[in-house]
Image (cartoon, grey):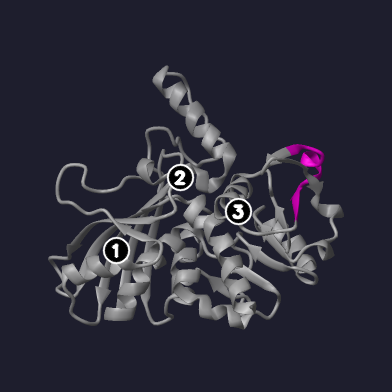
Amino acid sequence: MNISIVGATGNVGRKILEVIEKKNFSFNNLYLLASKKSSGKKIFFKNKEYTIKNLEEFDFSECDISFFSAGGKVAEEFAEKAAKHSLVIDNSSYFRMDPDVPLIVPQVNSKDLTKIKKNIIANANCSTIQMVLALKPLHDNFIIKRIVVSTYQSVSGAGKNPMDELINQTKLALDNKQIKSKNFTKQIAFNAIPHIDTFSENGYTKEEMKMIKETKKILDEKINVTATCVRIPVLISHAESVNVEFEKEFSLENIKSLLDQADGCKVIDEQKDGGYITQVEAAGKNETFISRIREDSTNKNAINLWIVSDNLLRGAALNAVEIAEAYIRLKK
């Protein structure tokens, strides 16, 4: 098994390397690819030094699986070329709604790996992944009718420069100095911005529409979904407040049991000070954490959940590597 990582110098690319190492993912040769300006740089991985290769010059016939983690423009230009020789697992949004490309969260819909037509598999949006992980066992048992989700997303979801900007803005704000935003539409330090990605004609942002469309494609087209996505001054991990309406009756004990047994999920839900998970605590963890589980007092067939997960790990790199593992198992 020869593998390549496109965007190896970025946040997600480096996190994929971490996941591969921790999982002891088996490979023969590893190719780290990036733009021309990063070509020649060195990355030390598993007691070996690797030289970054120029993506534009790379021959993808050298590898069996290619992880793309360099954004939609790179996926648009190179993914289908790579897919002529190598299975492509793409972290961008470019192929997610392509009917010929399965959109996979392995714990939820690994069966769709049988529907690969372009030799490309799409990795879902980070905020979608953590939500559908938690909702899959509930949908299987109680049938979800409607989801109302508000996200509280960390700046790392936008890349390294936004992370640096949050740190710099925080210092400036504490020193009472003027702040100019470069990567955000408003000041991000000590603030919340209800705007992620560009606006669509319907008034929703593209990030919100991603959650709506991807949830339906992964989980069930019949589910009604509405979303509000907010960027907050946190470096890593996304949090979500989710209201879920079911067709069937349920008990909270059954809900908690199903969630705690679900692959990739962990319930931390004590009704006391600190008896829940926050974004800081989720950073660096593989699990999707569910807290604040309670009945919706206005609807007997609905509940409220607080869902938190590391967006770079669970919401990107880990899911991508788990897609590769699921694909390999399927082919054996």
Q: Is residue 282 above or below residue 142?
A: above
Q: CA distance from mark 3 to mark 1?
A: 26 Å
Tell me: 22 left or right of 310: right
Q: Nearer the viewer, residue 10 or 64?
A: 64
Q: Nearer the viewer, residue 78 or 51?
A: 51
Q: CA distance from mark 2 to mark 3?
A: 14 Å
Q: CA distance from mark 2 to mark 1?
A: 19 Å
Disc 3: CA contacts within 10 A as few (<14), some (14-19) or many (>=20) = some
Q: Position of residue 166 (x, y in %)?
A: 48, 33
Q: Which residues are magenta?
A: 29-42
| Image quadrant where one finds the N terminus | bottom right
Q: Are marks 2 and 1 in contact (CB under 8 Å)?
A: no
What residue is drawn where x is 23% and y is 62%?
304
Q: Mark 1 sits on what residue?
A: 260
Which comes sooner in the sequence, label 2 or label 1? 1
Query: Is disc 1 placed on a helix, strand or loop?
Result: helix
| Residue type at the position of mark 1 | Asp
Disc 2: CA contacts within 10 A as few (<14), some (14-19) or many (>=20) = some
What residue is drawn where x is 25% and y is 77%?
246
Label placed on residue 20: 3
| Residue type at the position of mark 3 | Ile
Query: Is disc 3 placed on a helix, strand or loop?
Result: helix
Q: Nearer the viewer, residue 107 or 220?
A: 107
Residue 198 seen from this side: no
Q: Mark 2 sits on what residue?
A: 284
Between label 2 and label 3, give the one nearer the viewer: 3
